[in-house]
Amino acid sequence: MNAHRERTPTPCRLCGGPSSFQFAVGDRNRGLGPGRFEYRRCASCNSIFLPEVPVDLARYYASDGYGSAEQEMVPEFARRELAKLELITRFEQPGPMVEIGPGPGLFTRTAKAAGFQLTAIEMDSRYCEYLSDVLGVRAIRSDSPATVLAGLGPTRAVVMWHVIEHLLDPWQTLARAAEILEPGGILAISTPNPDSLQFKLLGRYWAHLDAPRHLQLIPARTLEDKASELGLRRVLRTTVDPVGLELNRMGWEYALRRHPARRESTATSMRAAKAITLILSGIERRGLAGSSYTVLFARDSGGAVGSARSPQA
């Protein structure tokens, strides 16, 4: 069967380069639909991608699948969202900001309270209603952020927290985001890391593969090279932000659940996941071994933004 796959060349969805079959896997995390999904690795850009996007992809996004819009900002959530905001405010003061894929708006609330003027692009109608009616931000319902970005005016910041892996057109969205950034403006992206220790060890059983919702896993170097082509300069990269560290723990926890979609974690498995996370923390906190990375880019303005700061958090 694999030999048949390899006789039919499959170009990379991101760069058009040659690719090879990696594995096939079902919706382990949520079990929202049948079928198995084939992932491939590009020999040119090293991305992992899903060549055939399900025509019924929407069924794999459960209502409130990324949290309830009305959920409270418990201290742990607040700490994580503040940490994201602090990354932005290292380089940018409150001003216009575009958030792509805000979901229930946890970061939106935090950024708005800090004085940013938010425009949110979100595909879920219920989330959009909450963002607009309760949080009072401009919310645009769309599953094509690149199209929406093309019609927006200049902004000081664009943020995509674990969104780019879901997009059918990640490079087009990146290009449109770069175009609307004012000189010195900041683009922030978080995404699962295909160079992580967990993906190397767990492969198709890795929680953050999240088939079929994640259409591609983009290596940091590949993303940075594309951003550079668009006139964006990396000013920060980290894998040890609070969300990244939590995703390390979550990855091991899901690895201990044979059928994550059907069985909840037990107290024993959660303790074991914490122990594994602690044992491997020295490795996962080093370089690009963590489960996700966050990278900030500045639109070049002659060298002012971030020029005196380290590119590592």
Image (cartoon, rainbow, N blue to C red):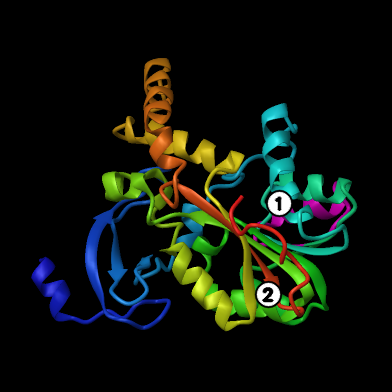
Q: Nearer the viewer, residue 236 or 42?
A: 236
Q: Which residues are magenta?
A: 120-138
Left or right: where 22 falls relative to 62: left
On the image, the x and y values in percent for residue 280 come to: 37, 33
Q: Quadrant of residue 47?
A: bottom left
Residue at the image point whose x is 35% and y is 77% from the top:
12
Asked if residue 129 is among those painted magenta in the image, a careful observer would answer yes
Q: Quadrant of residue 121?
A: bottom right
Q: Is residue 247 above or below residue 1?
A: above
On the image, the x and y values in percent for residue 210 come to: 41, 50
Q: Secondary structure at mark 1?
A: helix
Mark number for residue 116?
A: none
The amino acid on which the numbered mark 1 sits, given as a three-letter code, is Leu
Q: Which residue is mark 2?
A: 177
> Counting residues from the N terminus, which is met first, the one under dot 2 or under dot 1?
1
How busy is the neighbourhood of tag 1: few (under 14 within 10 Å), some, or many (20 plus)?
some
Residue at the image point whose x is 12% and y is 66% from the top:
2
Asked if residue 131 is among those painted magenta in the image, a careful observer would answer yes
Q: Quadrant of residue 174?
A: bottom right
Point out the residue furthest to the top here. 267
The amino acid on which the numbered mark 2 sits, given as a three-letter code, is Ala
Residue at the image point whose x is 75% and y is 49% from the top:
85
Res 65 seen here? yes
On the image, the x and y values in percent for residue 31 come to: 39, 44
Q: Which residue is mark 1?
A: 87
